[in-house]
Amino acid sequence: MTNRMGKFSIDRRAYDDVVITTPVSLPYVRFSEQSAHWWIGRALRALVDGSGIEARDIDGFCLSSFTTAPDTAIGLAEHLGLSVRWLDHVPLGGASGITGVRRAARAVQSGDCDVVACIGADTNQRGSFGNTLANFSRFSQDAVYPYGAGGTNASFALIARNYMEQFNVSREDLGRIAVAQRSNAMKNPNALMKEPLTLDQYMNARPIADPIHLFDCVMPCAGAEAVLVMRQDTARACGIAGARLRSSIERHNARSIDPMQTSGGWVEDVGELYSMAGVGPDDIDVVQTYDDYPVICMMQMEDLGFCRKGEGAEFVRSHDLRIEGDFPHNTSGGQLSCGQAGAGGSYVGLTEAVRQVLGTAGDTQVKGANLALASGFGMMTYTRGLSSCAVILSGEGA
């Protein structure tokens, strides 16, 4: 593990009993004629109903979405009738949720606001996905989309092929991750993928961009995820159970000298992630990695310290990644089996991690889960994702 700090760095303050509460996951749909605004509004209503805190008492708002344009967080604040003291719009794709929550936590800790609604949501209308891809970034507009590369499959195919050849990873190894997540998703009533997945089905699925095949890819959909961030004393006064934020990291444009990504920014700060929380990888009860593709899950297992670089394939061969297994991983089924609601996907692991440590995950609950790690990854260019982040959460008993 590394812990690369700048020459001006000091030890970061702990989060002083900041908690994450009221995890919301609206049931996804493949396509929706409703706007992203509608989904965000429903998520806010669910936060209010689930917490008992009135919207007028929510004085912070953090939004992540690709499909509210031309509106940003301030436009949504007016649309939803929120009057807030702190506002943020985090457009970091799969890193948005955790990055937004850690910023909200510091705002709450400093007293800039008391209760922050953090929401990730997107709609998925027929024909709208191409528009999202075409406007994802200047890089995609200039260097990828004009040449017919619609989306990230081709870029992740390059990353996956290089990773598999460098570290002797087979498609069967990656398939074990996807198959285990589908098994977990069968216990999640909100998962869009309702049928079991076998390793033979995974292996025989049609190719998309070799070595990426059908079940390596997430399904775009519409939906929303959300949480509230507040001080622990606020949560207790309101009778709300909260997951304590033990530590967090984020890193952007890490390891840019690597010609092709084999590690994310987690490796730069993972030591701080664990030292700040006062735990190690072996103490974690449940892990939620960002799963736009199985190869990125394996990369995170290594970069987050569960095995050494190059040992990911052996790690998934020797561990059971199902809810009832010895390494419970992406227990809701993750995006690979639940669907990816745009920027809402950045919250999937986070909301599930909160439920796990609070013991409210229902059929996906891991017995005795008190410590959870959730990670994020986003903003793909051609050879790498630029943003990575992670949090460690604990329940009342940890």
Image: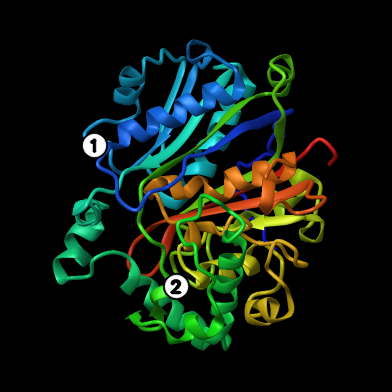
Where residue 369 appears, as percent x and y from the top left, is 78, 50
Q: Examine the image and state in which quarter residue 69 appears.
A: top left
Is 54 situated left or right of 330 in this image? left
Where residue 223 appears, as percent x and y from the top left, is 40, 44
Where residue 34 appears, as percent x and y from the top left, is 27, 37
For the point 30% across and 50% down, the residue is: 31
Q: Secondary structure at mark 2?
A: helix
Residue at the spot of label 2: 216
User: What amino acid does circle 2 point to?
Assistant: Asp
User: What amino acid does circle 1 point to?
Assistant: Ala
Is 135 situated left or right of 284 in this image? left
Which quarter of the rendered picture does the N terminus lie within?
bottom right
Q: Secondary structure at mark 1?
A: loop
Q: Tell whether label 2 touches label 1 (CB within 8 Å).
A: no
For the point 71% across and 67% down, the residue is: 306
Within 10 Å of the Cα at label 1, are there few (<14), some (14-19), or many (20+) other Cα atoms? few
Task: Tell me if residue 385 comes above or below residue 58 in the rendering.
Answer: below
Mark sitting earlier along the chain (1/2): 1
Task: Tell me if residue 119 comes above or below residue 374 in the rendering.
Answer: above
Residue at the spot of label 1: 69
Within 10 Å of the Cα at label 2, are there few (<14), some (14-19), or many (20+) other Cα atoms? many
Q: Residue furthest left?
A: 146
**Of 272 and 341, the residue lying toward us:** 341
Question: Can I make out residue 398 in this image?
Answer: yes
Task: Tell me if residue 199 comes above or below residue 276 in the rendering.
Answer: below
Which quarter of the rendered picture does the C terminus lie within?
top right
For the point 50% across and 88% down, the residue is: 165
Where residue 348 appears, as percent x and y from the top left, is 53, 49
Task: Tell me if residue 113 comes above or below residue 91 in the rendering.
Answer: above
Q: Examine the image and state in which quarter residue 300 appears.
A: bottom right
**Of 134 and 28, the residue lying toward us:** 28
